[in-house]
Image: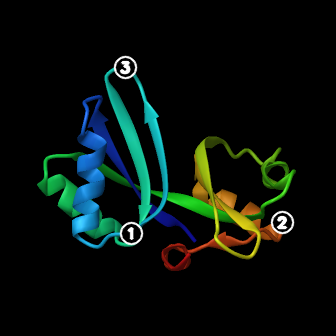
Amino acid sequence: MKVEQISIFLENKSGRLAEVTEILARNNINLRALSLADTADFGIFRLIVSDPAGAAALLKESGFTVGMNEVVAVVVPDRPGGLAGILGTLQGKGINVEYMYAFVQKSEGNAVLIFRFDDADKAIDVLRQGSIRVLSGEEMKKL
């Protein structure tokens, strides 16, 4: 089960981030998780949203450079060692974590980690074999 993520490339200019969020808000697209990384010249704003295809189309129409890719959303207990347990399950299986970010759910005492793996299908198989819950895109929309 993979989740669609949009990546928006932003110039490091005042107001660009606000412009993205305003476009999404005007079109009733909810942010579920996000990550922002930057360099001296540009930033990459990664988002899990309620309508990935719609968000990507709207942002492209507004002149933003947008990419879509698949990531893996994993439920982990929100306690010390939660991430270590996930990474321990993957260790030695030949799976690389390219990047990750997290958010804490409002209930159930869990967090959700978003991973970009070099081999998402293999990672999903390994995680499931380790009894780790992997969320679908539909489940992410409901959180």
Marks 2 and 3, how far apart in space?
40 Å
Confirm or deny contact between disc 2 and disc 3 (CB under 8 A): no
**Residue plotted at (12% across, 56% down):** 61
How many numbered markers are drawn?
3
Report the disc number at residue 30.
Answer: 1
Is 133 drawn above or below residue 46 in the view shown? below
Q: Which residue is mark 3?
A: 40
Identify the image quadrant of residue 106. Answer: bottom right
Please provide percent x and percent y for residue 38.
42, 30
Model colouring: rainbow
Tell me which label, 3 or 1, sits earlier in the chain. 1
Is 85 drawn above or below residue 135 in the view shown? above
Asked which secondary structure carries label 1, the reply is loop
Tell me which label, 2 or 3, sits earlier in the chain. 3
Identify the image quadrant of residue 14. Answer: top left
Report the disc number at residue 9.
Answer: none
**Residue plotted at (22% across, 67% down):** 26
Please provide percent x and percent y for residue 123.
68, 57
* Residue type marked 3: Ala
Q: Which residue is mark 2?
A: 130
Marks 3 and 1, how far apart in space?
29 Å
Confirm or deny contact between disc 3 and disc 1 (CB under 8 A): no
- Give neighbour class at mark 3: few <14, some 14-19, many 20+ (Cα, 10 Å): few
Confirm or deny contact between disc 2 and disc 1 (CB under 8 A): no
> For the view shown, which residue lies furthest in the top direction?
40
Marks 2 and 1, how far apart in space?
31 Å
Lateral position of residue 36 relative to residue 85, left or right: left
Please provide percent x and percent y for residue 102.
62, 53
**Residue plotted at (67% across, 64% down):** 74
